[in-house]
Structures are given as C-alpha cells and as structure tokens.
Image (spheres, rainbow, N blue to C red):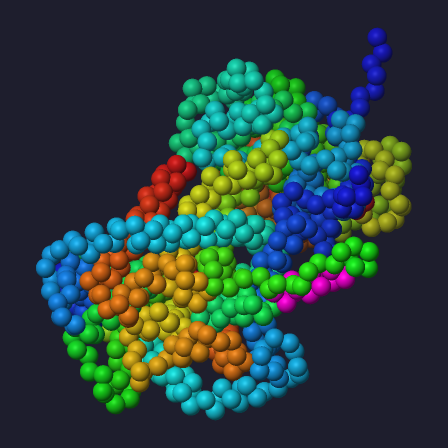
Amino acid sequence: MATAPKQPIISIQNITKRFGAVAAVDNVSLDIMPGEFFVLLGPSGCGKTTLLRMIAGFEVPTEGRIIIDGQDMAHVPPNKRPVNMVFQSYAVFPHMTVTENVGYGLRIARVPSSEIKSRVEEALALVKLDGFGARRPDQLSGGQRQRVALARSLVMRPKVLLLDEPLSALDAKLRAAMQFELADLQEQVGITFVTVTHDQDEALSMAGRIAVINRGLVAQLATPSDLYEFPTNRFVADFIGSVNLFDGRLVVDEPDRAVVDSPEIGRIYLNHGVTGPHDANIHVALRPEKIAMIPEAKGKPSAPECPEGDNIAHGQIRGMSYLGDITIYEVKLDSGRVIRVSRPNLSRYDQEDFTWDDKVWLSWHGSSPVVLLS
Amino acid sequence: MSLFKPRVPLAPLEYTKRLWMRAWVGLVLFFLYAPLITLVAFSFNDSKRNIVWRGFTLDYYKKALDNDSLMIAMGNSLTIAFISTIVSVVIGALAAVMLWRFRFPGKTATEGAMALPIVVPEICMGVAMLVFFAKIGFPTDLPWPFSLGAIIIAHITFCFPFVTMVVRSRLTSFNREEEEAAKDLGATEWQAFRDVLLPHMKPGLVAGALLAFTLSLDDFVITFFTSGPNTITFPVKVYSMVRFSVTPEVNAASALLIALTVILTTIALKVQSRMGGTPQGH
Amino acid sequence: MQDWKLNRALFASIASAPILWLVLFFIVPLGLVWLYSFGTNVGLTEIDISGTFANYARALEPLYLGIFVKSVGVAALTTIICLVVGFPVALAIVFATPKWRPWLLLAIMLPFWTNLLIRTYALMAVLRKEGYANQTIGWMWDNWSGLMTFAGLQPLGQFEPLPLLYNNFAVVLGLVYVHLPFMVLPLYAALDRLDKSLIEASLDLGAGHLRTLLSIVAPLAAPGIISGIIITFVPALGAYLTPDLLGGTDSQMIANVIERQFKRANDWPFGAALSFLLMYATFIAIAFQAMKSRQAERRQ
C-alpha cells in the first residue's frame, strides 16, 4: 500500500509581523506535520512567541498566510480555530474549580453535560490530576496549575496544541520531570504539539524537530541531534550547547578532505569536503567535549584520522570549574586564545589529574570540527 | 461580506481599535467636554444673551474682574484655600506618620474615624458644621481674615484626611533601614526625621497639598452652611449668580477658575511624575 | 511598626494634633447633630434634647419616605447608567496603546478636577430652553421640515423647545455627568490588574467576546465593579447641588430636604434626623461593599 505524502497540519507561508517599523517575524515559512512535537527555540525577543500567537489568532500577521488543516486562518478568530493554547502564565481561571476550568470550553461548545463530565474526568486522569476536580486554583501548586491548563486544552481535542514556554515557571527538578512527561503525553494523545521555549535543554529533550529563531528569521530547522552536531551558522552553533568558535581561511577543499588555517589554533583538518568558497574567511566550531586533553609530559599526540601535526594544539590550564559529572577547563593556547575543554569525570579521583597552570596537549578527531560559512 | 470586514483583521484584544469602541469613547468625551468647552468659548462671545456667536470680546472678563463682590469672594476663597492647605498638610502628615509608625490601642477605630470625613455625605458634614458653630457661638463680627475662621476650620476637617491618605501611601515605600542607618550614624530622632523621612515624604506632601488646595477651592456645600453674608466664597457667589441666569460674566468667572484648576492639576502631575510619587485620585 | 508605649512622648507629640482636631471639629459636631435628632424645638432657637423618636417617625411619613425612596432610585439609576457608559471606556483605556493610555486617563480625570458648580452650570447652559441642545435639535427640525416640504410632504409644525432642564431627566443626566469619572477609575484599576491571558484563554477555548466578558472578565473584576458602584452611588445619593440647580419642584432629593430644614424651615431636630438617616444609608452601602469585596477576594 502506497502512503500518500502527508499534508502539513500547519503551513506558515511567508509570514511577516511588524510592530511599527520593527519586524518581529520576518518572512518566515514553515511546515509542521501532523503528530509532530515541534519546538520554536530562540532567545527572548526573537519573535517565537509572536509566531505562536499568530497561529493561535491573538496577533494578526502583517503579511503572509497561516493555513491550519488546509484552511486559511486569515479571517478566523481564535475562538473558531482548531488549535488550543497553554499559556505561559497558565491562565487558569481563578474563580472556577479545576473541573469548571477543564469543562469551560466544552460548556461553550454546548456538549451534553454527561459527556462533559466523562471527558473532564478522562482529561484529568491523563494529566494525573484525578481527585483534584473540586479544588480551586489557589489550592494548587504551580505544576498542578499547569496540568489543569494542559487538561483544559487537551479536553477540546484540538488538531494542534500550542504551548508558550510551558516549563519556564517550574523549578529545575520539576522541569526535568515535566519534559519527559510532556513528550510521553504527546505520544499518548497523538496531537501535534507546537512549543515555544528559550531553553535549549528543554527543546533538545522534547522535540522531534526544532526551528531555531533569531531576530524574526528561522536560523535553522532540524532534528535536535542535527542542530547540535551539524549547525549551519554561528548563531545556532553558539546558541545550542557550548562551543569554541574560530575564524580561519579555507586553504584546502576537496571532496574527501578540507583544511582550515586558523591563526588562533593552527591547522584544522576535516575528513570531509565542505564546498565553501576557496581561500575565503570562514568560521569553525569545535565543541568542548570533542577535544581530548593530555598532560604535556606524555608527549605530543597525534589526532585520529588526521595527517601528522594537524588538529593539535598546545596550551596551559587557566581556569577550572568542577560540575560533578564533568569538569570544564579553560585552556590558554600558545596563540593567546582561551578555549573551553570539557572532560567527563570517569573515576572519583579524575578531577585531580589536571590542575591550574598545567601545560597540556589538545587534539580532536577529523570529523569533529564544523565549518560555518556565516 | 468582505465589504464589512476591515482589510487587515484586528487582533482579538485590540478593543481600542474597534470602531464602535472608538465611537463610544468619543461620545463620552464629547459628553464630558462639550459643555465645558462651550462654556469657555461663550465667555468670549460678544452677546448678552449668550446663545448665538456674535464675535470675540474680552469685555466679560473685564466685567468679572471689575465686579467687586466677585473679586472679594475670589480673595476669600484663595485665602481660605491657602490657610486650610498649610494646616491640613501639617495635621494630615502627622496623622499619616502616626498610623504608619505606631501600634496603639484603638488604632482600627482611629483609622476608620480618619476616613469618615471622606465618606460622609457633604450635606451631613455641612449641617454638622452649621450646628457646631451655632452651638459654640462662633463670633460673626471678627475682622477679616479671622471672620473666615469657621470656614477654614470646616475645610481643614475635610481636607486633612485626604492628605493623610496620600502621604500614607507614599510612606509605605519608605525603607525603614534608612532611618536606622541615620540613627546608627549618630542622628537623633528629630535629625533622622528631618534628614531622612521628611525628604522621602516630600512628593506625598506636595501632592497632598495640591489636592487639599483644589478641594478647598472647589467646595460649595460645606461652605454654604458655614459662610455668612460677609464671608462669601467664590463658589457660593457663583451659586447665587447662576441660580437664575446664565450670563457671559459667569462664564468668564468660571473660565478663570477652570484655568486655575487646570494649572494646579498640571503642576501636581508634573511634580508627581518628576518625584516618582504614586498618582492619587480620591 | 513600633509600640506606642516604647516612646510615649514621641507618640503624644505626633498623635495629639490630628486626634484632637478630628474629635473637636468632626466627632463633636456630628455628635451634636445626632443629639439634636432626638430633640424638639422649644421657642425659636432653643432645642430641648428630650430623647424623642418623633423626628425619625416623621421621616417615615409617606412624603419624606417617598423622597428617600426616590433619592435611592435616582442614585441607583445614575449608577447603572454610569456603569453601562463607563465600562467600555475603562476597557478602551486598558487596551489602549501605552502612548495613548495616560492621555485617555487624564481626559477622564480632568473634568473631575473642575469645580462641581461650574460643571453643573455648564450643563445648565446646554440644557435650558434656549440652550445649545435645543438649538441643535431645532436646527435639525427645521432642516428636516424643509426637506419634507421639498419632497412635497406636509412640513413639520413650529419647533417647540424641549423641556430639558428643571426636571428629573436633567437631574439624572447631571448626576451621570458629574459622577462618570468616579465609575471609570475603579473599573480601569480592576481591569488593568486582570491577567490578559485569561481573556485570551477564554477566547482560545471557543468563547466569544460577550461570553468572555460575562463569565471571565466580570467575575474577576467584581471587586472593582462593586467599588465603582459604591463610589458612584454614595455621593449621588447625597447630592445637593445637582438636584438643586437642575431639578424641578418634583425632583428634590434627600439632601435638598435636609438643607431646607436647616436654612429655611428652621426645624433642626428633624433635619438632624434626616441627616443621620442619610448617613446610615451611606454606611450600609459602604459596609456592603467591604463585605462583597472581601468575599470576592476570598473566592479568588
């Protein structure tokens, strides 16, 4: 049986939103597929929330079209859209009980009261709030209030659930637990989730696909691992995780290898071609955990899958921060540039191997550096 | 049907951009301002009958300013407002500090009693003053400005609770540690008050003073019950003039008072925004 | 907060002036009126505090009770009109752009700072027989009449100026005119505190604007709505100047009757009893508001 190509559930086509002269969202096009866990990630003020609010219908795009489930939303008010939203402040109605909150939308849709009762109970069970129906919002914790907001939206069986910074108001422990729970929940109900967040950990752990937004533009749209391992520009490389960025010149660019000459760290060898403009000024990203570090006394190493002498640097440890699972070192290279190197603490005494002012050799695999053209 | 929809649809919460809403607000503002604007406009109208525009003139301002009894009433009003304001600010500020600073028996009752002059209907307060001054036999033949004493006492009574309200809300933002720091550095109770607390209270005092001044200047009902034939205030005088006739001269006198109020309000708002005090209504 | 016993001298120096003033020039005068309300007139100026309830009994006679009921009715009508007119205005200010908001607030506040007498006078000039309102209506009448003649129809008769002043209509209009800002400001404060995402959540869940207004905005803004109602109702109930200047012979309110007892009829005990009835009504209204807003706060 041939599967028909899937229609996107949300199609954002050339959307621009200007506030006065400032473009909060600048000609963005995106397709979100049914059943996806889609995350809009970016720093605060990048336009991601504006984009979400345009999908919900609370902001009107200046230009472009939003199509939800094949229908143009231009003249559809929020109360007629097949999407529901979980607000950043949760927006749980303070004067209604949990049951009344969750049943609000169904009452408006004139669903028979017996059905409302069973659907509300079902939704509360889904978010693990069974037995809380009679409580008032002021008797709930922040996490519980969020569950009420979730249940209130899910009970409407929307085509798409929009979540605005769903975890930002929770404390760190609860946030980590909720990340998994949200992902599970999404799998369970099969509804498309579109989430906005500024927290990269949150995005990486939950999302199927992530659109990184910067200054109203989509900087990169990819799966979490692709974003981390194959960023296409400096903004994404820097925003997702921790990274060392070097300026350099592309001196060799062949189908199976490339070499970048960087005054800061020397020759960087890549075991694949990059198809960049030859001899142009480009940037190289190197993640701290991809750099191996050995004491100077052990002698000059050779980097794996590289010609002798490439992908090696010499420096001195200038700073350390012990984080328990890993230790981050600040290493001052001979060129004067300070870079970050992280090492897992494999044994309980590991962190004593290196200390301040130790001279070290650094090396990295030929597949580790990423060349960035912009 | 797209004919009736705006070309760019409105976001749901842009209530203020909706046409009916704008029309509504416009009509309300028209309702509030049209009478006042026509009043001022017709004070410049060169016609006794005050109905049709006959050309610009300042005659009625001249007439109003030449009207001795009107000007005496204005002088009385300003004198009363001036003295009442000074006393109200002192008493009101003391009351505010008392309520803010101390715990004492009967505090709730005192707080309630302080708010009473604000909520009691003006007419009740007016008759209370009438009865009181009649009972104690307040002399009516004192020389000016002492003849205004009864009115001034009445005005202070209803003005100072407003000052207390404004100053007290200002005091809530005071950081007690500043006062403690001053004492730690060797200041006496009085020096700490003068150098630390008083400067903090200042915007509240200024706002309270302007509020008291306007309230005193505007009051009609309570003054009506405490003024005698020789102690007419401006509103009482205007009242006797407008009761039966609408004349351009009254328009001119009213316009002068409106101008005075607008100037005072502007100063109050300027002072408040500059000093960062909390804006206060009543 | 410091206990007064820790520094009695300081407390006395701060507290004595305001407390003395309040007692001497407010509590004592009101107490006198209260005593007089149980008194009888003996002679022209003598009043005997006999402890009689006759003044209160007289206040309950149909004539005065009628005026009392009418005053409450007029104040209630004024309050309702202010609420209906003021609510959209408050809503508009809350959702206005930050640039416009202070100006709109100022526009509502400014008349409030203008002398009550002058505002009432301005309204008189508009409403009287040859006032601007009648002129405008007359002008429209004439034009319409001319248009009808032009169309070959019977022209309208001579325009008769409408009796807009010196009646109950003028009193209610005047009270609304004077008290509208009292209503708008507390409504604005309450709506401004409201979390806007609650409105959005309601729309998001399928409710229309009217439904959202009734089931989300109104209950949550209830304390502000109640205080707006009371802040408007209380001074409207005790209004003296507006009915005096704009009303006719049949639109006297309770304050006018009180004034008459003191200034003309010279029946102070009866006037005192009426004053205290008005004050009790005011206190009941304020107590009601305190109770309701405490309830509303507890519910949230």
Query: Residue A75: horizontal and vertical position, in percent?
Result: 75, 38
**Residue at the (28%, 89%) spot, across then down:** B144
Query: Residue C252: horizontal and vertical position, in percent?
Result: 38, 60
- The answer to whether residue A339 is above or below residue B194 is above
In the image, C257 versus B190, the foreground residue is C257
Q: Is residue B270 visible?
A: no
- Which quarter of the rendering shows the N terminus of chain A? top right
- Which image quadrant for residue B9? top right
Query: Residue C161: horizontal and vertical position, in percent?
Result: 60, 64
**Residue at the (55%, 47%) spot, across then down:** A319
* Range drawn in magenta: C133-147
- The answer to whether residue A116 is above or below residue A173 is above
**Residue at the (74%, 63%) spot, across then down:** C143
**Residue at the (37%, 64%) spot, across then down:** C240
Q: Main secondary structure of the magenta part?
A: helix
Q: Is residue C81 visible?
A: yes
In the image, B174 versus C117, the foreground residue is C117
Left or right position of C119 against A13? left
